[in-house]
Amino acid sequence: MKAAYIEKPGLPENIIYGDLPKPEPAEDQVLVKVGAVAVNPVDTYVRSGSIPWDLPKPFIVGCDLAGTVEAVGPGVTRFQPGDRVWGSNQGLLGRQGTFSEYAAVDQCWLYPTPANTSDQEAAAIALVGITAYLGLVRHAQLEAGQTLFVHGGSGGVGSCVVQMAKALGARVITTAGSDKKMEICRRLGADAVINYKVEQVRQAIRKLAPDGVNVWWETLREQDFDLIVENLTLRGRIIVMAGRDARPPFPVGPFYVKDCSMHGFAMFNAPAHEQQRAADAINQWLADGKLRAQIDRVMPLAETAAAHRLQEENTLGGAGSLAGKIVLVP
Ligand SMILES: NC(=O)c1ccc[n+]([C@@H]2O[C@H](COP(=O)([O-])OP(=O)(O)OC[C@H]3O[C@@H](n4cnc5c(N)ncnc54)[C@H](OP(=O)(O)O)[C@@H]3O)[C@@H](O)[C@H]2O)c1
């Protein structure tokens, strides 16, 4: 089968697009004929070696996938050949990745794909959707009527946070770096969008939420905690989930006197039953038309190295050339 893989961590050019043996599903595994995969920033950290996990050799890159069940191991109870499935959390913690024509995945990391959702949409929503759900529901405990702020409402995580927060009944304020991206945020349901390249974010938030926001979801890799804490309400919650190397100053006094809390998490630490709960909610929202994948572009799997370069230019280089997910098709 064709696969995008590396023999050793390094630059995007280390990604080889070539032939590897088609995997056999083990006892509890499902063999998925992959219809689509999606790139996440973490794929590039694993590929570059900046997250030093022990990787299978060769290591197929990527976390997300959607496709059709081709075969199942003898212990598989939840799926049968022909079922459409999506999943994430592969290619992490030493597991084999998904950027290949076939992937053997433990059944606990797969979910049925709703009939109204394409493989491309399901792959694009996988990791970012699970992340958004875990942060909003498990950590921030966002309630209807509360106000949430998220940086980057047209991005992978941000677009899911905006839509899910709306589905949960919250008021949503977000940012975008162009008129086109502002329009995307509005289409996703944001109540207010700040163009951070034109407006002063501090002043704009103060005007939009004079009493502060209940939840501040920080997607930036370099956090400004003075800005964040001064814009939180009493008992405000901060979600941090980006910037492994970040060591910013923190305003302890202003934080604790407002009874605030901060929740950090990495989605791959969540056990299968917690990710399953997230996937169930995602599937319901997809089926109800309350959640849509924000796809920037679709590329052939053979162009995985170019897709990694593009993702890296945005995540590390701040290029601003993406509005959502890069999806690839075998
Ligand atoms: N902890 C976890 O479990 C977890 C899970 C998923 C992702 N992450 C991390 O979360 C981060 C975001 O991931 P993603 O997949 O959403 O990336 P993405 O799709 O590339 O989105 C990044 C967003 O950040 C915005 N942005 C960049 N610089 C900005 C600035 N200076 N001010 C305001 N907005 C800015 C961009 O907005 P514009 O395009 O409008 O400039 C874009 O919407 C990454 O660092 C990733 O590693 C962590």
Image: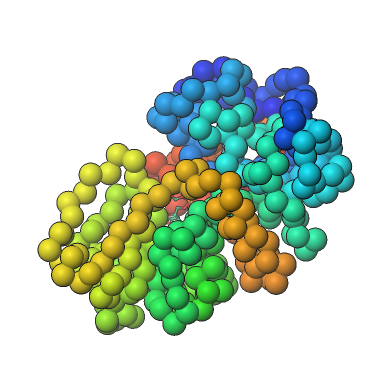
Any part of residue 90 in sight: yes
Q: Nearer the viewer, residue 168 or 116?
A: 168
Report the label total: 0
Reply above or below: 324 against 305: below
The vertical placement of 304 against 146, above or below, is above
Q: Is residue 166 left or right of residue 21?
A: left
Q: Position of residue 228 (x, y in %)?
A: 26, 64
Residue 133 position (above or below residue 204):
above
| Residue at 49% from the left image edge and 57% from the top image edge | 134
Which quarter shows the C terminus?
top right
Is residue 200 visible to us here? no
Pinpoint residue 236: horizontal percent, then vertical percent. Answer: 30, 70
Quadrant assignment, res 261: bottom left
Q: Is residue 17 above or below residue 63?
A: above
- Work out whether residue 144 or residue 292 is closer to the camera in this orientation and state it: 144
Front in this rendered view, residue 308 or 170: 170
Q: Please identify the residue farthest to the right as the structure is shown.
A: 82
- Identified at 52% across, 60% down, the residue is 133
Quarter occupied by the N terminus: top right
Q: Position of residue 182 (x, y in %)?
A: 48, 69
Give the quarter of the image for residue 27. Answer: top right
* Residue drawn where x is 25% and y is 75% of the image: 234
Left or right: 211, with 129 as reference point = left
Residue 145 x/y as whole percent: 44, 82
> Which residue sits at x=30%, y=39%?
245
